[in-house]
């Protein structure tokens, strides 16, 4: 609101109190000391979303598995909770789910029961989240079901290989395989790619791969709160640490999972940190995040990079939401609004 | 990244440690305890923006004036710092500035020296920020100069009446007067309205007034980080308190200034808190904010309300920026990018 002339910043020692995060201060610039706070659940969101925001910090956020079997067990445990929610959601949204295989890659075909003729020659490829290690099989599907049901477009959800069965870049190989099949089925301009968190990163990585391999671009993409920087750079890794109740901390289970997937590969490789890729020539992109999202910065950094590259990059940010809570449940009004906006975005940008 | 079933939130006493903010918890829902942190200046922004982020908390943020003369003195002091920066900025951006009066309202005509013929019949109305009380005369102009210079469109900057000369709704009356003159000069579809902070609120309020008075809508508007809720609701009032180095706190000087302007008027009136207005029928809107902005929530809440009303609402969010730092200086790369995007937005949406 006011404009102050630049001041010489006082030199100060950056020290994190109460958190063991790496200090990545710009050289010689004073950090900000933020006091401890108690953050009420905001009264500016729906009661349904308030219940999500009020959930305690993700159980086990700082005690990730340390063995391949441990990761497999965690994935199975989460799947046991998530999987049974998929069929009722598909029923509510009038969507059919059929497992299939495309060129050796396991997928689910998620199709609206009432497919509008205008969408019959459109195809959305979905790449699920879960830190590259979690959400196999049915657990991959809530976001795909919400999109198919609300956008009323056919979706192919990629159930890509994950550790400990297969490591980097297996997930990306599988996503690219399905993308190639999609653009062989309908015109590339009719194809959209979407997914959130690791799925948001994989969406961006798939387009980078397509560029590398001289494949046609999709008509539009929608990476939700992408894990765009696996090196833990990004201001909201600090500002929203222990505020976001899903990822909680840059040193939590999600980073451990990413390391397990990467198996020593350079985390700054754009195929793991797509914010460092060359985003010129990308199709119109729509990003989604929330004000309490640990990856708020890594979402808006992608928007800035796309804008610098001359790419149309829409963004929706939801009040009070932590990481990827916009596809938690189709009965949350804000989640529904998110997908209505994504549906409109794909409808404006995809060919027919 | 994972989807958890709803949990019953444990009841907990909301108590703010280190901050004397009102606790507006949703009934019976557990608040989040955020520990004290030291936030390094992010290394993910330009060195120029790092210098802005590293500035200490706004001097005097918690010691606002308490008398009319005190406010006048503060406005004069800030103007003395800001005013001299305007002419060099106008020179760099090749913009001419000419004071004028429109139907009794003081304005500046801010005009690109090389006006592209395509923009000759377009007109942007600018409403400056400053908590309704600050930034008179030349201090009103940096944002208008950046827009005129980068969008290369003619701008009329409204130097609206402010306390202690005139109180609510004088600023809005003046903005509406100039808007009426603008739509009498060129077709309304060729007119844009923009401004940030209080100017973002006034932008939204002017459109609400135009609706009330059955005036034609402008072609597009760009409220930057609008003071859309003067009642202090909005999650980032808490999460970004003492993180944002400009506004610092919902209980700081800006709220005191708003109270001085409102003179006891209901702060929830949409003419002071436009997020509570009926936004149906609004023109395409582009919002701008930053991840450390105290008004991050009050910006994204406007986007959500616009989306619910079926209005196109673009949003750009800048990494690490506090309140309204996107028009701090045209030599900051991120600030330039912000205006290039705003320029493209107006160019896409305004008639010719």
Image (cartoon, coloured by chain):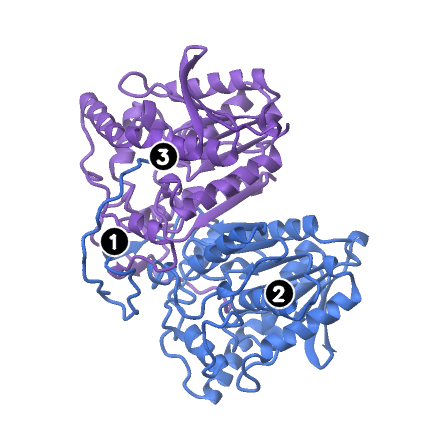
Chain colours: A blue, B purple
Asked if labels 2 and 3 share a chain, the reply is no
Q: Secondary structure at mark 3?
A: loop
Mark sitting on residue B230: 3
Name the residue furthest right: A117
Q: In this picture, is B197 found above or below A43?
A: above
Q: According to the image, label 1 marks what residue?
A: B15
Q: Secondary structure at mark 2?
A: helix
Chain letter of the residue beneath label 1 in the structure image: B
Residue A313 appears at what percent x and percent y? 56, 51
Q: Is residue B97 left or right of residue A125?
A: left
Residue B38's quadrant in the figure? bottom left
Residue A29's quadrant in the figure? bottom left
Q: Nearer the viewer, residue B89 or B344?
A: B89
Residue A230's quadrant in the figure? bottom left
Chain letter of the residue beneath label 3 in the structure image: B
Residue A79 appears at what percent x and percent y? 55, 76
Whether tag 3 and tag 1 are in contact, CB under 8 A, the answer is: no
Mark sitting on residue A207: 2
Q: Residue at x 26, y 49 (%)?
A: B242
């Amino acid at each position: 609101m006011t404009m102050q002339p630049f001041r010489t910043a006082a030199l100060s020692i950056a020290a994190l109190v109460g958190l063991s995060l790496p200090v990545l201060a710009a050289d010689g610039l004073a950090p900000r000391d933020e006091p401890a706070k108690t953050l009420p659940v905001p009264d500016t969101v729906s009661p349904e979303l308030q219940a999500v925001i009020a959930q305690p910090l993700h159980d086990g956020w700082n005690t990730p598995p340390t063995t391949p079997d441990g990761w497999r067990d965690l994935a199975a445990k989460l799947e046991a909770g998530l999987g049974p929610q998929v069929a009722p959601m598909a029923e509510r949204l009038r969507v059919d789910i059929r497992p299939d295989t495309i060129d050796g890659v396991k997928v689910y075909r998620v199709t609206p029961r009432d497919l509008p003729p205008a969408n019959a020659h459109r195809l959305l490829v979905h790449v699920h989240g879960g830190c590259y290690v979690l959400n196999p099989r049915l657990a991959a599907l809530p976001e795909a079901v919400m999109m198919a049901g609300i956008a009323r477009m056919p979706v192919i959800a990629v159930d890509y290989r994950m550790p400990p069965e297969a490591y980097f870049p297996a997930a990306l190989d599988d996503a690219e395989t399905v993308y190639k099949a999609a653009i062989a089925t309908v015109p590339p301009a009719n194809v959209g790619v979407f997914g959130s968190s690791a799925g948001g990163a994989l969406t961006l990585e798939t387009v980078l791969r397509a560029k590398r391999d001289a494949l046609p671009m999709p008509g539009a993409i929608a990476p939700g709160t992408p894990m765009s920087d696996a090196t833990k750079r990004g201001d909201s890794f600090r500002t929203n640490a222990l505020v976001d109740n899903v990822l909680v901390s840059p040193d939590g289970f999600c980073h451990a999972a990413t390391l397990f997937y990467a198996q020593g590969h350079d985390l700054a490789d754009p195929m793991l940190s797509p914010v460092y890729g060359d985003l010129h020539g990308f199709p119109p992109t729509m990003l989604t995040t929330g004000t309490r999202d640990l990856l708020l910065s890594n979402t808006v950094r992608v928007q800035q990079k796309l804008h610098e590259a001359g790419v149309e990059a829409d963004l929706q940010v939801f009040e009070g939401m932590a990481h990827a809570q916009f596809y938690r449940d189709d009965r949350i009004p804000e989640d529904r609004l998110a997908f209505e906006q994504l549906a409109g975005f794909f409808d404006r940008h995809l060919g027919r």
